[in-house]
Image (spheres, helix red, strand yellow):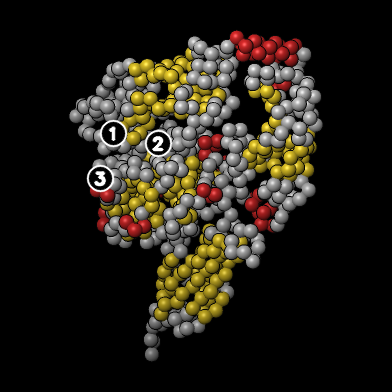
Amino acid sequence: MQDRVVSAVMAGQASGIGARRGRLGRWLVPAAAVVLLAGLGVPVGASESGREIGEVVLSSGAPGELTVSWEAPVLVPFEYRVSWAREDLEFLSFQSENEAHRGNEWLSGDAASVILTGLDEGATYKVQMRARFRSVEGKVSASPWTDEVTAGVSSSPVAQQHHDQQQDLQVQGQQQGLPDEQQGSELGENEIGEVVLSSGAPGELTVSWEAPVLVPFEYRVSWAREDLEFLSFRFVDEEAHRGNEWPSGDATSVTLSGLQGGATYKVQMRARFRSVEGKVSASPWTAETTAAVLAQQQAELNRVLAPGFVRSPERDVLLQRHSTHPNPTGVWSDGVTMWIADDRNLDRAYGYELATGARDADKDISTLDDAGNDFPRGLWSDGTTIWVADAGYGQELYAYDLDTGARDADKDINASCSAGNCDPMGLWSDGTTMWIVDWGDAKIYAYELATGNRDADKDFSTRRAAGNGTPRGLWSDGLTLWVDDAYDDRIYAYDLATGNRRADLDFNTLAAAGNGDPVGLWSDGTTMWVVDHQDEKIYAYNMPVSSALKSLSISGVDFGLFQTGIFAYSGTAAAGTMSATVTAAAAFADDAAVTVAWEAADGTTGTGTSVTLSEGENTITVTSSYDADGDPDTDNADVRTYTVTVTVPPAADNS
């Protein structure tokens, strides 16, 4: 793709002035200071519409070429991103290198058109684009995507003749009343016959087919677990539960292995042919065929019931977006109420019932505006205090009483802008450390929760090279830290203890679900909820199977709100309490083994849910484990240990 862009036509753009409060942006300078930042493209106080690209027009004046022209926004961006792809392909992530039939072009802000070359003659391509702006502080933001625009690419005489022949065949197919999916192909001789699926071994699926009369140079066998979409053919590498195989033209079967035991998979395929001129064409897709894969063990069957990363739309939370709050940002829940921040309207955190998604206005925290918390972003609470990140000039975390909404300024945490933490976004804490995402710095900053002091030794740097260059929300189960990305439509996973990437635990299904502007994250251990900044709902996804606990309680002991990712708690029992009952439930009850051990202050130890206590400090330890591969001889277990320190005061002396 090094020679694909032939030219970019430059045109000076007029500038306009108005009031602006951009997508996840903040006021740049007071509105009275009307300044156009030359080269930065963000005049003070410009309206949101001033950032939007106008009409996009495609035209093809030469074989294999496509000219993209557009009406520039009122504000001058520092660059444009033009994303293009052949109509049957998905757009490419901006972090990926251009491929043969799709890619991204990055043009300077004074460009008005660009010519793409080397495209498939006669093929239809689609284009979408956005403008990118840089603020006074050097932070990058982007306009909304334009609508997709499509156009056909001109052909050379030979290619045009081939195209005309295809059109003739299409007309013939229509005249014969053939199904839509078969029209426009070389019918009959290039069609694949019956496709048969069979599973003869655990985790395997054999695909067999009746070959077409014409011999193709290869087949494409596209497969996916039944609840997932098929993978674009340009993604050659298989994912965990979907992919493409490319058997040679003389093959009549292929065996897929490493599949999920007990799950149902779907398969469709087509034959691919190469003409004398070297042009590639394909037969129609076969109808989808499904079959169940033999299960290896019960644990695999449980994964079918709650597969990780898969959409769980029945648990979506629908927002009163248009009438109440148009731009949701952060999210946090105590398991009963879900609070959702919004930075566009009334500057408050809105309450919803987690189970039903119904509005619960009585739980709103409506004191943000009075506190100066005008740009609320991430939320996190320990069950007593709720902290709200603000991306305005204060760059701080505002503290409020969760029950009453009253300000508790003594617990504020000031983000360290001098260290680079000038754009605080998502929050998460393990009860000791508070981590704050900085979306402009591609970093997660650490602070002591109790004091607000910086703890730089616990900072995380997200991976720009992997695509996680614009992080916004985060959540952890105490072992894995998940970080979403604004422009890559993905949730990246990191090991909380080491900061190492855990790509096998990424959520990469957001774009397919329409969750294209992720910003806030929260999970109860079984479901991950993802806030979409531009949409009217919180998207729900299933978490991967783990040993996480979803609840823990001890009779007669109040140790605060239990949260899946917090492992240490402390509470006080009534004076003279000599025993208590421990109740613990694993998020994936059928997979995790839970044990309770205790040590009383007098040295007594034991196991079981009924525990013995004595005066002083007693330690109750709840351990949950999940053996990922089901083999006790391998060290592949997910183990979590939750500790509760219970203090029993001396009994009153009534003598």
Q: Pointer 2: residues within 10 angstroms few (<14), some, or many (20+)?
A: many
Is 499 in front, or is 575? 499
Q: CA distance from mark 1 to mark 3?
A: 17 Å
- What residue would you read off at disc 2? 327
Whole-number angstrom distance, CA of label 2 to CA of label 3: 21 Å
Q: Position of residue 489 (x, y in %)?
A: 48, 38
In the image, residue 124 sits, relative to residue 144, either above or below, namely: above
Residue under label 3, please give it: 394
**Residue found at x 64% / y 21%:** 278
Q: Position of residue 231 (x, y in %)?
A: 61, 36
Residue nearer the viewer, 230 or 529: 230
Mark toward the start of the polypeptide (1 vs 2)? 1
Label 1 sits on residue: 135
Q: Hey, what amino acid is under mark 3? A: Gly
Kindly report which numbered mark, 1 or 2, lies closer to the viewer in this rendering: 1
Tell me the kind of residue under disc 2: Asn
Residue at 69 percent across and 24 percent down: it is: 273
Q: Residues within 10 Å of mark 3 (few under 14, many from 20)?
A: some
Say which amino acid is labelled 1: Ser
Please report the residue visible at 61 percent of the width from the left and 33 percent of the height from the top: 233
Query: Dot 3: what SS?
Result: loop
Image coordinates for residue 562, horizontal then vertical, percent: 46, 61
Quarter of the figure that contains the C terminus: bottom left
- Say which mark, if any, is on residue 546: none
Looking at the image, which residue is at 39% across and 19% down?
8
**Mark 2 touching mark 3, by CB under 8 A?**
no
Secondary element type, mark 1: loop
